[in-house]
Image (tube, helix red, strand yellow):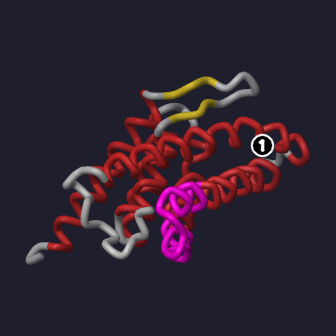
Amino acid sequence: MKHKKLYLTVYSAVFAALICVATIIIYIPIPTGGYAHLGDGLVLLSGLFLPIPYAAVASGLGSALADIFSGYAIYAPATLIIKALCAVTAALVFQALKKLPLIVRTVLSCIAAEILMVLGYLAVEAFALGYGAAALGGIFGNAMQGCVGTVSCSVLYLALRKTRLIANHHSSDNES
């Protein structure tokens, strides 16, 4: 592809915008505080769809912007790092599990990334924000957010695999 870098930059920008919008607009309040949103599914999807550096930038930037725009600016620096690492984790686990069936690889890569997200926010709240042991109260909400992200990414990725959009993406996948 002649303009591969340009295409990847554009895809990354589109992912960042979609992540931001899906985080702010499409959300589910969680009774224990916070909310689950479809942005996490797109963070994970970027890790499966884009090369790692592009996925990391798109995920971190889109998620951090969503925090800023929705009144959670205090979390934006941590979100930038955590969501970038989530995309990287999803990509690396997905690549490492090449011998497994596609659905298993997809779900396991999402779960690994979302565990990192839960632990990342636990650490930020406990230490950086000074909540101490009270930060443990956020685990349930973040885990629910992770479940929504895992399900939405898995459904989207497997559906998109059936289209020409990414039908040839990861051509060495075991599609069983």
Q: Residue furthest right?
A: 133
* Residue 87 versus residue 23 in the image, above or below: below
- Is 9 one of the magenta-colored residues? no
> Is 157 on the left-hand or right-hand side of 139?
left
Tell me the amino acid under the disc marked 1: Ile
Q: In this view, does 108 lie to the left or right of 126?
A: left
Image position, residue 20 (x, y; %): 40, 41
Q: Is residue 37 above or below residue 171?
A: above
Q: In which quarter of the image is the N terminus?
A: bottom left
Q: Residue at x 55, y 73 (%)?
A: 97
Helix, strand or loop at disc 1? helix
Q: Residue under circle 1?
A: 139
How many numbered marks are there?
A: 1
Q: Give the range drawn in magenta.
A: 91-110
- Please report the residue visible at 77 percent of the width from the left and 43 percent of the height from the top: 139
Vertical side of 164 occupied by 72: above or below: above
Kindly give the residue lying farthest to the left in the view shown: 2
